[in-house]
Image (cartoon, rainbow, N blue to C red):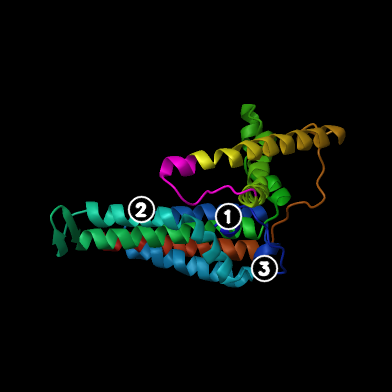
Amino acid sequence: MLKDITLGQYFPMDSVVHKMDARYKIIITLIFLVMLFWGQHLTSLIAGLIFVIIATACSKIPPKMLIKSIKPIVPILIITGCLNLFLLDGGKTYFAWKFIKITEQGVQTSVFMLVRICLLIAGTSLLTYTTSPIVLTDAIESLLSPLKKLKMPVHELAMMMTIALRFIPTLIEETDKIMAAQKARGADMESGSLVQRAHALIPILIPLFVSAFRRAEELALAMECRCYHGGEGRTRLRELKSGMRDYIALAITLLLFAAVIILNILLH
């Protein structure tokens, strides 16, 4: 399961989406999120599905990678689906037994929420799949630059967000190695009661925290040795530049968003 977590990973490829300005990719992703959660009609899901299909095709990211990004949240999907399925009441009754009742409203809401969450994960994963952490940091800092007038540490905030995102795959890999080492020593983490399983995680969590703090110290020392002092006077290897592909992608996303708004108003 740990190997299926692809959050924060970057897959370098030669595609239109990879070449886009990271600032526009962040803005487009935010519009996609708003569009996905706009209203309760099927139109938002259809527009979200169209967006994900077009973005995946243009990014050349294999669809199996998007499916892989959804696999770790399967337990959350199951819990969400069951809660909506059994707790919502309304419309035609499909099944009833004692306190368990499945209705038309429960089925519709359950399916709607599951599809929405899957599209949410797939759409946002494309941002980190197609954007390197360094470029993502520069883009976040550029978008938040107006807040510098309010004396907010924009560069530090962007750096912390990107470092946290960057180290997710590293910590996952470290956890996998620690678990393999503990199993080789005879540790049993898959049997027993819930309390016993939680107790079996202690030999994993302690080395993981020690490793995380050690990596943080090494990173801080490396940045200090390179005279890192924040965003003031900092130069960049690659400057962010927007082009026609960015304007076209933003225009397509806005057209989808406008269509969702209009259809939601007409169907309300």
Which mark is first along the chain, 3 or 2? 3
- In this view, 195 is above or below 124: above
Q: What range is drawn magenta here?
A: 185-198
Label 3: element kind: helix
Q: Residue at x 65, y 60 (%)?
A: 130
| Disc number lying in front (2 or 1) | 1
Q: Residue at x 82, y 50 (%)?
A: 237
Q: How many marks?
A: 3
Q: Earlier in the sequence, mark 1 or mark 3?
A: 1
As helix, strand or loop, the secondary structure at mark 1 comes to: helix
Image spot of residue 128 (x, y percent)? 62, 55
Label 2, residues with CA under 10 Å away: few <14, some 14-19, many ≥20: few
Image position, residue 94 (x, y; %): 17, 66
Question: Which residue in the structure is indicated by mark 3?
Answer: 16
Furthest-front residue in this view? 186
Q: Which mark is residue 79?
A: 2
User: Mainly helix, strand or loop, the magenta region?
Assistant: loop
> Any mark on residue 2, and which?
1
